[in-house]
Amino acid sequence: MTDKIFQEKIGPVALTIVPTEKYKSNKIVFKFRAPLERETVTKRSLLSILLETNNKKYPTQTAFRKQLANLYGANFYTTTAKKGNEHVLTVIFDMIDGQYVSDGSHILEDAFAFIHEALFSPNVTNGAFDNETLIREKENLKSSLEGIYDDKIRFASKRLVEEMFKADAYRFGSAGVLEDIDNITAEDLYTYYLQFIAEDAVEVFICGDVTTEQVTPLIEKMAFSPREERKGVFYTKEAPQEVQIIHEKQAINQGKLVLGYQTDTLFGDSDFVALQLANGLLGGFANSKIFINVREKASLAYYASSRIDSFKGFMVISAGIDEVNYKQALDIIQEQLVAMKQGDFTSDELNQTKEMLVNQLLETNDQAQGLIELVYNNVLREADLDLDTWIAKIKTTTKEEVVSAINKIKPDTIYFLSKGGEELHGKNHI
């Protein structure tokens, strides 16, 4: 069971404790948030990698990992993500609950000491990160970003976002910009690190069998300096007057069709849950209209689905198709969207989608990270959509509300990646 969530501001740190006895481990998550900008996104990506690699006290990966092993096999890693026009660098420490090991009374304190070393004592000499480490990790980041080109599903989705938001910083991926990596020096990165640690909004989440009395003193000991409080920036984009069509060619066998729509709905909005259900009916689950009609009945797609981004307010429909089937697949997808907007779905289909969405939520929130992400989403949007409230809203959402939500979406961009063949014609296919 999860008890009442505890939230407190400790200096510049917003602390949230999600108390639960469900797990035999505790999860500590630091989330660092700053505006999404090209000037900093690649530096933040590199910084996230360096933080999980070594530091001044543990200057090699071997020493770093050995100390984690000493902490009963703890796990420490970082991630980067976009939440609307916010860039979020996440530091995660997974550890066993001290009550399950001998002499575990100090393990929480030891965990915070390790995190403190990682955050405040980076592997820096004379105002520069260790160059050998940086060179290696720059190459690794390059390989990772170059790998997107080889994964055509990811590449097509990336190109769609770049086209939909070409005048918006959201076009940049959370892992950075490939072309910017080489120009970042060890000195540049340390200069940015100082800005990062001094200015980022800091939110700490702890999920497990812990108390505020245990955690608060450990947060107070950390060397975070006072900073200006900054709320997240979240806004949707208006769809263009005319749908833009982008057709690009590569030496591939299977075409990638990706359609972008603006939803004008964000996490926590009054019609957010209704839009989730609309997406589920349209292409979110295996019983959806797009999956059944494009993939199963017409056999036009190797895969077909839809998803929504609830912090930027857009929907993406993706399908893997043979190039010759482009127009037919596009027409059928359009027909499914029109049908949804006209309310052409049954109560049984809606109820089945509700059950699937509830099960998906329960599965996601069965893990500590899922619980933390749900709380974080509410913190960012100043919303009140906890798991129980979310499920209750799913169950009570009406067909009329679902139809109203799907009727708000407007077409923005068609992106098609193929090996060549006939050119695409027409200005408004969606």
Image (cartoon, rainbow, N blue to C red):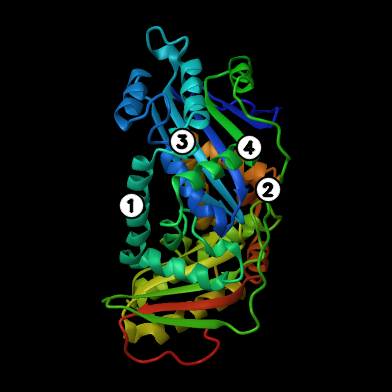
| CB-based contact (under 8 Å), mark 3 and mark 1 | no
Amino acid type, callout 2:
Arg
Q: Which of labels 2 and 1 is toward the front?
A: 1
For the residues labelled 4 and 3, the Cα–Cα distance comes to: 31 Å
Q: Quadrant of the C terminus?
A: bottom right
Name the mark on residue 16: none
- SS under mark 3: loop
Answer with mark 4 or mark 3, whichever residue precedes in sequence. Answer: 4
Q: Which of labels 2 and 3 is toward the front?
A: 2
From the image, tell me which residue sits under label 3.
367
Amino acid type, callout 1:
Glu
Residue drawn at 31 percent across, 78 percent down: 250
For the residues labelled 4 and 2, the Cα–Cα distance comes to: 23 Å
Q: Nearer the viewer, residue 213 or 138?
A: 138
Residue drawn at 67 percent across, 56 percent down: 234
Answer with mark 1 or mark 4, whichever residue precedes in sequence. Answer: 1
From the image, tell me which residue sits under label 4.
198
Q: Is residue 30 above or below residue 288?
A: above
Residue 287 drawn at (x, y percent)? 43, 63
> Which quadrant would residue 238 be assigned to in this image?
bottom right
